Amino acid sequence: QLLISVGCAAFNARVALAALGWRVQVERFPDITRPELAYRITIVDAHLEWIPLGELAASIADRHTNRRQFEDDPVPAEVIAELIDAVAEEGAELMPVTRPEHRLALAALSQRADAIENADPGYRAELRRWTTDDPRRPDGVPAMSVPHVDTGSGDDLPIRDFDTHGMGWLPMRTHSALTQCLMLLNTRANRTVDWLRAGEALERLLLELTRRGYA
């Protein structure tokens, strides 16, 4: 997950440079003697007037995670197709999950994974470190942006529980349902470099959604 988040940050850097008119070369894990070096981004072209990726720049500041109730409005097929193409540009795959048996299987796997993570004391301790009801704290997940959780949300698909102190401000139920738009983002392999690409594809997906008015 850390490398996925680094991939997200690197994609934002690419978008910001594109908005300034700079074409870049991206190297992932460019130095085998420095395994902690995930990226090298090099400007390779003179200043250009327009690079398509730069259109996403305004969405970087607008994009925020929304943990409120999900809407039931259908996502248009043409939007889904555009999102699939955008993710493919980043070397990943976005798969709409539409068959009822596949949606049920994904729900069961998500709930199982959620139970495994929450059974890990280290995982719960990390969540406690990252959640806060202190409005002065500049990092982490603030209580005002997470649902209050006590006996469980009863949603079909579990939403990550950040309410480690029982002080979440938002309603508990998010109404995530098996009838709503559900897509799975994946890479073709499971190497560390694929984790970076997953982050880049995820951030592009989130920015493309933000640009279209989704949260």
Image: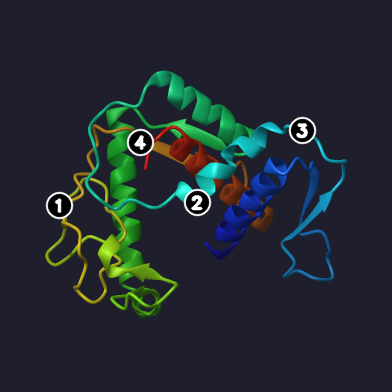
Q: Which mark is residue 61?
A: 2
Q: Residues within 10 Å of mark 2 (few under 14, many from 20)?
A: few
| Residue highlighted by disc 4 | 182
| Residue highlighted by disc 1 | 154
* Residue at left offset 44%, top offset 73%: 138
Q: Amino acid at mark 4?
A: Leu
Mark 1 to mark 4: distance in Å? 18 Å
The residue most toward the top is 78
* Residue at left offset 51%, top offset 43%: 59
Q: Is residue 131 visible?
A: yes
Q: Is residue 189 above or below residue 80?
A: below
Q: Disc 3 vs disc 2: Cβ atoms closer than 8 Å?
A: no
Mark 3 to mark 1: distance in Å? 51 Å
Nearer mark to the viewer, of 4 and 2: 2
**Rendered location of residue 137, percent (x, y):** 40, 77
Q: Is residue 98 above or below residue 134?
A: above
| Residue highlighted by disc 3 | 49
* Residue at left offset 72%, top offset 44%: 20
Q: Secondary structure at mark 4?
A: loop
Q: Earlier in the sequence, mark 1 or mark 4?
A: 1
Mark 3 to mark 4: distance in Å? 37 Å
Q: Quadrant of the C terminus?
A: top left
The residue most toward the left is 151
Q: Amino acid at mark 2?
A: Ala
**Rendered location of residue 123, percent (x, y):** 39, 74
